[in-house]
Amino acid sequence: MGVREAPGPWPGLASQALLARARASVARALSPQLPAFVDRGQGAILYDVDGRAYIDLAGGVGCLAVGHAHPRVVRAVQEQAARFFHTDYAVAPYEGYVAVCERLCASAPGRFPKKAALFNSGAEAVENAVKIARAYTGRSAVVAFEGAFHGRTYMALSLTSRVVPYKASFGPFAPEVYRVPYPYPYRSPFPTDEETVEFCLRKLEDLFTLHVEPERVAAVVVEPVLGEGGVVVPPPPFLPRLQEVCRRHGILLVVDEVQTGMGRTGRMWASEHVGVEPDLLVVGKSLAAGLPLSAVVGRGDVVDAVREAGIGGTYVGNPLSCAAALAVFEVFEEEGLVERARRLGEQILAALRILQQDCRVVGDVRGLGAMVGVELVKDRDRKTPAPESTDFVLRHAAERGVVVLKAGVYRNVIRILAPLVIGEEELGRSLSVLADCIREAEALPGS
Protein backbone atom coordinates (compact mmCIF):
# COMPACT_ATOMS: atom_id res chain seq x y z
CA MET A 1 0.00 0.00 0.00
CA GLY A 2 1.30 3.43 -0.87
CA VAL A 3 1.03 6.47 1.35
CA ARG A 4 0.14 10.06 0.50
CA GLU A 5 -1.33 8.85 -2.78
CA ALA A 6 -3.34 12.02 -3.46
CA PRO A 7 -1.43 14.95 -5.03
CA GLY A 8 -1.31 18.47 -3.63
CA PRO A 9 -0.53 20.04 -0.26
CA TRP A 10 -0.65 18.31 3.09
CA PRO A 11 -2.93 18.55 4.84
CA GLY A 12 -5.23 18.68 1.84
CA LEU A 13 -7.63 21.48 1.03
CA ALA A 14 -10.67 19.69 2.44
CA SER A 15 -8.85 19.06 5.72
CA GLN A 16 -7.65 22.65 5.86
CA ALA A 17 -11.24 23.85 5.51
CA LEU A 18 -12.35 21.54 8.33
CA LEU A 19 -9.47 22.71 10.53
CA ALA A 20 -10.64 26.30 10.05
CA ARG A 21 -14.17 25.31 11.06
CA ALA A 22 -12.83 23.44 14.09
CA ARG A 23 -10.79 26.43 15.24
CA ALA A 24 -13.96 28.50 15.23
CA SER A 25 -16.22 26.06 17.08
CA VAL A 26 -14.31 23.30 18.91
CA ALA A 27 -12.71 23.87 22.32
CA ARG A 28 -9.01 24.72 22.00
CA ALA A 29 -8.08 21.92 24.40
CA LEU A 30 -9.21 19.37 21.81
CA SER A 31 -6.38 20.03 19.37
CA PRO A 32 -5.90 16.99 17.10
CA GLN A 33 -2.49 15.44 16.58
CA LEU A 34 -3.20 14.61 12.93
CA PRO A 35 -4.01 17.76 10.91
CA ALA A 36 -5.95 15.71 8.36
CA PHE A 37 -9.60 14.76 8.88
CA VAL A 38 -10.59 11.12 8.61
CA ASP A 39 -13.23 10.06 6.10
CA ARG A 40 -13.18 6.29 6.61
CA GLY A 41 -11.11 3.41 7.94
CA GLN A 42 -10.59 -0.22 7.08
CA GLY A 43 -8.43 -2.65 9.00
CA ALA A 44 -5.25 -0.78 9.91
CA ILE A 45 -5.71 1.96 7.29
CA LEU A 46 -7.27 5.40 7.62
CA TYR A 47 -8.30 7.52 4.65
CA ASP A 48 -8.66 11.28 4.97
CA VAL A 49 -11.18 13.57 3.30
CA ASP A 50 -8.62 14.44 0.62
CA GLY A 51 -8.07 10.79 -0.36
CA ARG A 52 -4.75 10.16 1.37
CA ALA A 53 -4.11 6.86 3.15
CA TYR A 54 -2.43 6.42 6.53
CA ILE A 55 -1.20 3.30 8.29
CA ASP A 56 -2.70 3.56 11.76
CA LEU A 57 -0.25 2.56 14.51
CA ALA A 58 -2.32 4.46 17.09
CA GLY A 59 -5.44 2.31 16.83
CA GLY A 60 -7.66 4.94 18.43
CA VAL A 61 -5.24 4.96 21.41
CA GLY A 62 -5.50 1.20 21.68
CA CYS A 63 -9.25 0.86 21.08
CA LEU A 64 -9.05 -0.96 17.77
CA ALA A 65 -7.51 -4.38 18.30
CA VAL A 66 -9.84 -5.76 15.60
CA GLY A 67 -9.17 -2.78 13.33
CA HIS A 68 -11.43 -0.23 11.73
CA ALA A 69 -14.85 -1.31 10.48
CA HIS A 70 -14.38 -5.04 10.99
CA PRO A 71 -17.26 -6.62 9.00
CA ARG A 72 -18.40 -8.83 11.88
CA VAL A 73 -18.55 -5.90 14.29
CA VAL A 74 -20.27 -3.64 11.76
CA ARG A 75 -22.88 -6.29 11.07
CA ALA A 76 -23.54 -6.89 14.78
CA VAL A 77 -24.02 -3.17 15.45
CA GLN A 78 -26.28 -2.73 12.43
CA GLU A 79 -28.47 -5.66 13.50
CA GLN A 80 -28.76 -4.31 17.04
CA ALA A 81 -29.49 -0.77 15.80
CA ALA A 82 -32.43 -2.14 13.81
CA ARG A 83 -33.88 -3.66 17.00
CA PHE A 84 -33.39 -0.94 19.65
CA PHE A 85 -30.77 1.63 20.64
CA HIS A 86 -31.32 2.08 24.35
CA THR A 87 -33.44 1.27 27.38
CA ASP A 88 -31.07 1.56 30.36
CA TYR A 89 -30.40 -1.96 31.61
CA ALA A 90 -31.47 -1.01 35.14
CA VAL A 91 -34.91 -0.09 33.79
CA ALA A 92 -35.56 -2.63 31.04
CA PRO A 93 -32.83 -5.30 30.77
CA TYR A 94 -31.57 -7.03 27.63
CA GLU A 95 -29.55 -10.15 26.94
CA GLY A 96 -26.53 -8.41 25.42
CA TYR A 97 -25.53 -6.90 28.75
CA VAL A 98 -25.69 -10.29 30.46
CA ALA A 99 -23.79 -12.00 27.63
CA VAL A 100 -20.91 -9.48 27.82
CA CYS A 101 -20.67 -9.96 31.59
CA GLU A 102 -20.62 -13.73 31.10
CA ARG A 103 -17.79 -13.47 28.57
CA LEU A 104 -15.79 -11.20 30.87
CA CYS A 105 -16.28 -13.42 33.92
CA ALA A 106 -15.19 -16.48 31.95
CA SER A 107 -12.16 -14.71 30.51
CA ALA A 108 -10.79 -12.71 33.45
CA PRO A 109 -8.03 -14.30 35.54
CA GLY A 110 -8.98 -15.78 38.89
CA ARG A 111 -10.05 -19.16 40.22
CA PHE A 112 -13.06 -17.79 42.06
CA PRO A 113 -16.67 -16.89 41.22
CA LYS A 114 -16.82 -13.57 39.38
CA LYS A 115 -19.31 -10.88 38.55
CA ALA A 116 -19.10 -7.84 36.30
CA ALA A 117 -20.64 -4.41 35.82
CA LEU A 118 -20.51 -2.37 32.61
CA PHE A 119 -19.75 1.31 32.17
CA ASN A 120 -18.93 3.74 29.35
CA SER A 121 -15.29 4.78 29.67
CA GLY A 122 -12.13 3.54 31.29
CA ALA A 123 -12.23 6.43 33.74
CA GLU A 124 -15.78 5.52 34.78
CA ALA A 125 -14.75 1.92 35.34
CA VAL A 126 -11.77 3.00 37.46
CA GLU A 127 -13.98 5.25 39.58
CA ASN A 128 -16.49 2.47 40.09
CA ALA A 129 -13.75 0.00 41.00
CA VAL A 130 -12.72 2.40 43.77
CA LYS A 131 -16.35 2.71 44.91
CA ILE A 132 -16.72 -1.07 44.98
CA ALA A 133 -13.45 -1.49 46.88
CA ARG A 134 -14.50 1.07 49.47
CA ALA A 135 -17.91 -0.53 49.86
CA TYR A 136 -16.42 -4.00 50.37
CA THR A 137 -13.60 -3.04 52.74
CA GLY A 138 -15.21 -0.17 54.62
CA ARG A 139 -11.92 1.67 54.12
CA SER A 140 -11.32 4.99 52.36
CA ALA A 141 -7.69 5.32 51.23
CA VAL A 142 -6.42 4.34 47.78
CA VAL A 143 -2.82 3.85 46.63
CA ALA A 144 -1.68 4.55 43.06
CA PHE A 145 1.69 4.84 41.30
CA GLU A 146 3.95 7.50 39.87
CA GLY A 147 3.55 7.71 36.09
CA ALA A 148 0.06 6.19 36.19
CA PHE A 149 -2.82 7.20 33.96
CA HIS A 150 -6.31 6.16 35.03
CA GLY A 151 -8.51 8.76 33.32
CA ARG A 152 -9.67 12.37 33.48
CA THR A 153 -12.76 12.39 35.70
CA TYR A 154 -12.03 13.60 39.20
CA MET A 155 -11.39 10.35 41.06
CA ALA A 156 -9.53 8.90 38.08
CA LEU A 157 -7.61 12.14 37.63
CA SER A 158 -6.65 12.08 41.29
CA LEU A 159 -5.09 8.66 40.63
CA THR A 160 -3.42 9.87 37.43
CA SER A 161 0.19 11.00 37.91
CA ARG A 162 1.06 13.79 35.50
CA VAL A 163 0.44 17.49 35.97
CA VAL A 164 0.60 18.96 32.44
CA PRO A 165 -1.72 18.67 30.63
CA TYR A 166 -3.98 16.48 32.74
CA LYS A 167 -4.04 18.05 36.22
CA ALA A 168 -2.81 21.62 35.80
CA SER A 169 -5.41 24.19 36.96
CA PHE A 170 -7.97 21.51 37.87
CA GLY A 171 -7.40 20.97 41.58
CA PRO A 172 -8.28 20.28 44.31
CA PHE A 173 -8.42 16.56 43.75
CA ALA A 174 -10.04 13.71 45.63
CA PRO A 175 -8.60 13.14 49.10
CA GLU A 176 -7.17 9.92 50.49
CA VAL A 177 -5.09 9.13 47.40
CA TYR A 178 -1.47 8.14 48.10
CA ARG A 179 1.32 7.48 45.63
CA VAL A 180 4.47 5.37 45.45
CA PRO A 181 7.12 4.77 42.73
CA TYR A 182 6.51 2.34 39.87
CA PRO A 183 9.39 0.09 38.73
CA TYR A 184 10.87 1.81 35.65
CA PRO A 185 13.92 -0.31 34.71
CA TYR A 186 15.35 2.12 32.14
CA ARG A 187 15.34 5.06 34.57
CA SER A 188 15.96 3.14 37.78
CA PRO A 189 18.97 4.23 39.85
CA PHE A 190 19.54 0.58 40.72
CA PRO A 191 21.62 -1.82 38.61
CA THR A 192 19.25 -4.79 38.77
CA ASP A 193 15.54 -5.41 38.31
CA GLU A 194 15.44 -7.11 41.71
CA GLU A 195 16.72 -4.00 43.47
CA THR A 196 14.30 -1.82 41.52
CA VAL A 197 11.31 -3.91 42.57
CA GLU A 198 12.56 -4.09 46.15
CA PHE A 199 12.88 -0.30 46.31
CA CYS A 200 9.32 0.28 45.08
CA LEU A 201 7.81 -2.24 47.47
CA ARG A 202 9.82 -0.80 50.33
CA LYS A 203 8.38 2.62 49.49
CA LEU A 204 4.91 1.10 49.73
CA GLU A 205 5.69 -0.27 53.17
CA ASP A 206 7.17 3.13 54.12
CA LEU A 207 3.90 4.72 53.02
CA PHE A 208 2.09 2.54 55.54
CA THR A 209 4.46 3.75 58.24
CA LEU A 210 4.70 7.43 57.34
CA HIS A 211 1.40 8.45 55.78
CA VAL A 212 -1.52 6.02 56.07
CA GLU A 213 -2.01 2.85 58.09
CA PRO A 214 -2.70 -0.16 55.85
CA GLU A 215 -5.91 -0.89 57.78
CA ARG A 216 -7.32 2.29 56.20
CA VAL A 217 -6.37 1.39 52.58
CA ALA A 218 -9.20 -0.02 50.47
CA ALA A 219 -7.26 -0.69 47.26
CA VAL A 220 -4.03 -0.46 45.36
CA VAL A 221 -4.75 0.53 41.75
CA VAL A 222 -2.06 -0.44 39.25
CA GLU A 223 -1.44 -0.78 35.52
CA PRO A 224 0.42 -4.00 34.61
CA VAL A 225 2.26 -1.88 32.03
CA LEU A 226 2.25 1.91 32.23
CA GLY A 227 0.58 3.06 29.01
CA GLU A 228 0.36 6.84 28.93
CA GLY A 229 3.26 6.78 31.38
CA GLY A 230 5.57 5.56 28.61
CA VAL A 231 4.97 1.85 27.95
CA VAL A 232 6.93 0.98 31.08
CA VAL A 233 7.08 -2.79 31.58
CA PRO A 234 7.85 -3.65 35.20
CA PRO A 235 10.09 -6.61 36.06
CA PRO A 236 8.02 -9.83 36.26
CA PRO A 237 8.25 -10.21 40.07
CA PHE A 238 6.63 -6.82 40.71
CA LEU A 239 2.91 -7.58 40.37
CA PRO A 240 2.97 -10.92 42.22
CA ARG A 241 4.90 -9.37 45.10
CA LEU A 242 2.55 -6.38 45.12
CA GLN A 243 -0.39 -8.76 45.42
CA GLU A 244 1.33 -10.49 48.35
CA VAL A 245 1.60 -7.14 50.15
CA CYS A 246 -2.06 -6.39 49.47
CA ARG A 247 -3.23 -9.76 50.77
CA ARG A 248 -1.12 -9.44 53.88
CA HIS A 249 -2.89 -6.19 54.77
CA GLY A 250 -6.39 -7.06 53.52
CA ILE A 251 -6.12 -4.55 50.66
CA LEU A 252 -7.84 -5.19 47.33
CA LEU A 253 -5.67 -5.28 44.21
CA VAL A 254 -7.34 -3.38 41.35
CA VAL A 255 -5.56 -3.96 38.04
CA ASP A 256 -6.33 -1.36 35.37
CA GLU A 257 -6.17 -3.24 32.07
CA VAL A 258 -8.02 -0.61 30.03
CA GLN A 259 -5.04 -0.42 27.67
CA THR A 260 -3.24 -3.71 28.30
CA GLY A 261 -6.31 -5.93 28.14
CA MET A 262 -8.16 -7.56 25.25
CA GLY A 263 -5.11 -9.35 23.90
CA ARG A 264 -2.85 -6.33 23.49
CA THR A 265 0.16 -7.85 25.29
CA GLY A 266 0.03 -11.34 23.80
CA ARG A 267 -2.22 -12.72 26.53
CA MET A 268 -5.88 -11.84 26.87
CA TRP A 269 -4.97 -9.98 30.06
CA ALA A 270 -1.49 -8.73 30.92
CA SER A 271 -1.98 -10.01 34.47
CA GLU A 272 -1.78 -13.53 33.07
CA HIS A 273 1.89 -13.12 32.12
CA VAL A 274 2.85 -13.22 35.79
CA GLY A 275 0.02 -15.30 37.24
CA VAL A 276 -1.69 -12.46 39.10
CA GLU A 277 -5.42 -12.83 39.89
CA PRO A 278 -6.76 -9.31 40.56
CA ASP A 279 -9.57 -8.81 43.03
CA LEU A 280 -10.98 -6.35 40.51
CA LEU A 281 -10.02 -6.00 36.84
CA VAL A 282 -10.79 -2.82 34.92
CA VAL A 283 -11.51 -3.27 31.19
CA GLY A 284 -12.12 -0.80 28.35
CA LYS A 285 -10.79 0.48 25.02
CA SER A 286 -10.74 -2.51 22.61
CA LEU A 287 -13.60 -4.24 24.41
CA ALA A 288 -16.14 -2.83 21.93
CA ALA A 289 -13.92 -1.86 18.97
CA GLY A 290 -14.06 1.85 19.78
CA LEU A 291 -17.67 2.11 20.92
CA PRO A 292 -18.01 3.36 24.51
CA LEU A 293 -17.93 0.33 26.78
CA SER A 294 -15.89 -0.51 29.86
CA ALA A 295 -16.25 -2.90 32.75
CA VAL A 296 -15.23 -3.88 36.24
CA VAL A 297 -14.99 -7.65 36.65
CA GLY A 298 -13.76 -9.53 39.67
CA ARG A 299 -14.54 -11.44 42.80
CA GLY A 300 -18.26 -11.93 43.08
CA ASP A 301 -18.36 -11.22 46.80
CA VAL A 302 -16.46 -7.96 46.27
CA VAL A 303 -18.59 -6.72 43.37
CA ASP A 304 -21.79 -7.61 45.23
CA ALA A 305 -20.78 -5.56 48.28
CA VAL A 306 -22.47 -2.55 46.66
CA ARG A 307 -26.13 -2.14 47.55
CA GLU A 308 -28.84 -2.23 44.89
CA ALA A 309 -28.63 0.80 42.51
CA GLY A 310 -25.35 1.86 44.13
CA ILE A 311 -23.55 1.79 40.78
CA GLY A 312 -24.79 2.23 37.21
CA GLY A 313 -25.67 5.08 34.88
CA THR A 314 -28.01 5.99 32.06
CA TYR A 315 -25.89 4.76 29.15
CA VAL A 316 -23.74 2.08 30.77
CA GLY A 317 -23.69 -1.18 28.84
CA ASN A 318 -25.46 0.37 25.86
CA PRO A 319 -26.99 -2.31 23.59
CA LEU A 320 -24.99 -1.21 20.53
CA SER A 321 -21.73 -1.37 22.47
CA CYS A 322 -22.63 -4.77 23.92
CA ALA A 323 -23.35 -6.11 20.44
CA ALA A 324 -19.96 -4.82 19.28
CA ALA A 325 -18.18 -6.41 22.27
CA LEU A 326 -19.72 -9.82 21.65
CA ALA A 327 -18.59 -9.60 18.04
CA VAL A 328 -15.09 -8.60 19.17
CA PHE A 329 -14.82 -11.73 21.32
CA GLU A 330 -15.81 -13.82 18.30
CA VAL A 331 -13.22 -12.12 16.08
CA PHE A 332 -10.51 -12.77 18.67
CA GLU A 333 -11.33 -16.47 18.70
CA GLU A 334 -11.77 -16.90 14.95
CA GLU A 335 -8.70 -14.91 13.90
CA GLY A 336 -6.34 -15.85 16.73
CA LEU A 337 -5.64 -12.25 17.65
CA VAL A 338 -4.03 -12.97 21.01
CA GLU A 339 -1.32 -15.03 19.33
CA ARG A 340 -1.15 -12.43 16.57
CA ALA A 341 -0.39 -9.77 19.19
CA ARG A 342 2.51 -11.84 20.49
CA ARG A 343 3.99 -12.26 17.01
CA LEU A 344 3.48 -8.60 16.14
CA GLY A 345 5.30 -7.58 19.29
CA GLU A 346 8.25 -9.77 18.43
CA GLN A 347 8.47 -8.27 14.93
CA ILE A 348 8.16 -4.68 16.07
CA LEU A 349 10.65 -5.02 18.93
CA ALA A 350 13.19 -6.82 16.73
CA ALA A 351 13.05 -4.13 14.04
CA LEU A 352 13.32 -1.24 16.51
CA ARG A 353 16.15 -2.84 18.50
CA ILE A 354 18.19 -3.10 15.31
CA LEU A 355 17.59 0.64 14.86
CA GLN A 356 18.62 1.25 18.47
CA GLN A 357 22.05 -0.24 17.86
CA ASP A 358 23.17 2.56 15.53
CA CYS A 359 20.85 5.43 16.41
CA ARG A 360 21.96 7.31 19.52
CA VAL A 361 18.67 9.17 19.98
CA VAL A 362 16.98 5.84 20.78
CA GLY A 363 17.57 5.35 24.49
CA ASP A 364 15.34 2.35 25.07
CA VAL A 365 13.04 -0.01 23.17
CA ARG A 366 10.58 -1.95 25.28
CA GLY A 367 7.17 -3.56 25.21
CA LEU A 368 4.95 -6.48 25.97
CA GLY A 369 3.24 -8.10 23.01
CA ALA A 370 1.90 -5.51 20.58
CA MET A 371 2.29 -2.68 23.10
CA VAL A 372 5.64 -1.10 22.28
CA GLY A 373 7.48 2.06 23.29
CA VAL A 374 10.60 3.77 21.95
CA GLU A 375 12.13 6.27 24.36
CA LEU A 376 14.07 9.08 22.67
CA VAL A 377 16.88 10.85 24.50
CA LYS A 378 19.37 13.62 23.79
CA ASP A 379 22.23 11.58 25.15
CA ARG A 380 22.36 7.99 26.26
CA ASP A 381 24.58 8.52 29.29
CA ARG A 382 22.36 11.08 31.04
CA LYS A 383 19.15 9.76 29.46
CA THR A 384 17.99 13.33 28.96
CA PRO A 385 14.47 13.20 27.47
CA ALA A 386 14.07 14.39 23.88
CA PRO A 387 10.41 15.48 23.53
CA GLU A 388 11.26 17.72 20.57
CA SER A 389 12.64 14.74 18.66
CA THR A 390 9.51 12.77 19.52
CA ASP A 391 7.28 15.55 18.17
CA PHE A 392 9.41 15.67 15.02
CA VAL A 393 8.98 11.95 14.44
CA LEU A 394 5.21 12.05 14.93
CA ARG A 395 4.76 15.03 12.63
CA HIS A 396 6.94 13.73 9.80
CA ALA A 397 5.63 10.19 10.06
CA ALA A 398 2.07 11.50 9.68
CA GLU A 399 3.08 13.53 6.65
CA ARG A 400 4.44 10.31 5.14
CA GLY A 401 1.31 8.36 5.93
CA VAL A 402 1.92 6.77 9.35
CA VAL A 403 -0.05 7.74 12.46
CA VAL A 404 1.64 6.94 15.76
CA LEU A 405 1.33 8.10 19.37
CA LYS A 406 3.57 9.67 21.95
CA ALA A 407 3.59 8.94 25.67
CA GLY A 408 5.75 9.18 28.76
CA VAL A 409 5.94 11.52 31.71
CA TYR A 410 8.44 13.57 29.69
CA ARG A 411 6.53 13.12 26.39
CA ASN A 412 9.55 11.48 24.80
CA VAL A 413 8.23 7.98 24.08
CA ILE A 414 6.89 6.84 20.73
CA ARG A 415 3.99 4.51 21.53
CA ILE A 416 2.75 1.82 19.13
CA LEU A 417 -0.75 0.35 19.61
CA ALA A 418 -1.42 -0.88 16.10
CA PRO A 419 -4.58 -2.86 15.26
CA LEU A 420 -3.80 -6.54 15.66
CA VAL A 421 -5.16 -7.15 12.15
CA ILE A 422 -2.43 -5.06 10.50
CA GLY A 423 -0.95 -6.76 7.44
CA GLU A 424 2.71 -7.67 7.01
CA GLU A 425 3.26 -5.18 4.20
CA GLU A 426 1.58 -2.40 6.17
CA LEU A 427 3.63 -3.18 9.25
CA GLY A 428 6.89 -3.27 7.32
CA ARG A 429 6.14 -0.02 5.54
CA SER A 430 5.17 1.78 8.74
CA LEU A 431 8.27 0.62 10.61
CA SER A 432 10.45 1.75 7.71
CA VAL A 433 8.88 5.20 7.81
CA LEU A 434 9.33 5.39 11.57
CA ALA A 435 12.99 4.38 11.30
CA ASP A 436 13.63 7.04 8.65
CA CYS A 437 11.97 9.73 10.78
CA ILE A 438 13.92 8.72 13.89
CA ARG A 439 17.19 8.88 11.96
CA GLU A 440 16.26 12.33 10.68
CA ALA A 441 15.42 13.42 14.22
CA GLU A 442 18.86 12.27 15.33
CA ALA A 443 20.47 14.51 12.70
CA LEU A 444 18.68 17.64 13.96
CA PRO A 445 20.86 20.30 15.65
CA GLY A 446 20.85 19.79 19.41
CA SER A 447 19.73 16.16 19.22
Image (cartoon, rainbow, N blue to C red):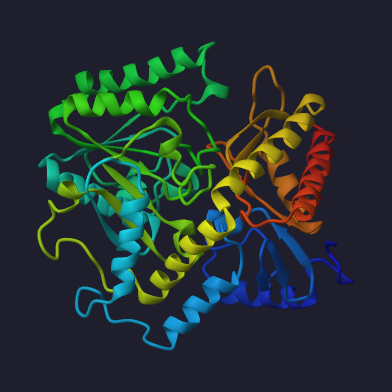
Quadrant of the image occupied by residue 360: top right
The N terminus sits in image quarter: bottom right
Front-most of 390 and 352? 352
The C terminus sits in image quarter: top right
Q: Residue at x 73, y 56 (%)?
A: 423
Quadrant of the image occupied by residue 223: top left
Q: In the displayed orientation, state which residue is furthest to the right.
A: 7
Q: Residue at x 61, y 40 (%)?
A: 372
Q: Residue at x 33, y 52 (%)?
A: 106
Q: Is residue 202 above or below residue 419?
A: above
Q: Residue 420, position in %: x, y?
A: 61, 53
Q: Residue at x 42, y 81 (%)?
A: 80
Q: Residue 418, position in %: x, y?
A: 63, 52
Q: In the displayed orientation, state which residue is furthest to the bottom.
A: 82
Q: Residue 101, position in %: x, y?
A: 31, 61
Residue 154 seen: no
Q: Is residue 212 above or below residue 398?
A: above
Front-most of 88 and 215? 88
Front-most of 220 and 20? 220
Q: Is residue 209 above or below residue 327?
A: above
* Left or right: 431 in relation to 386: right
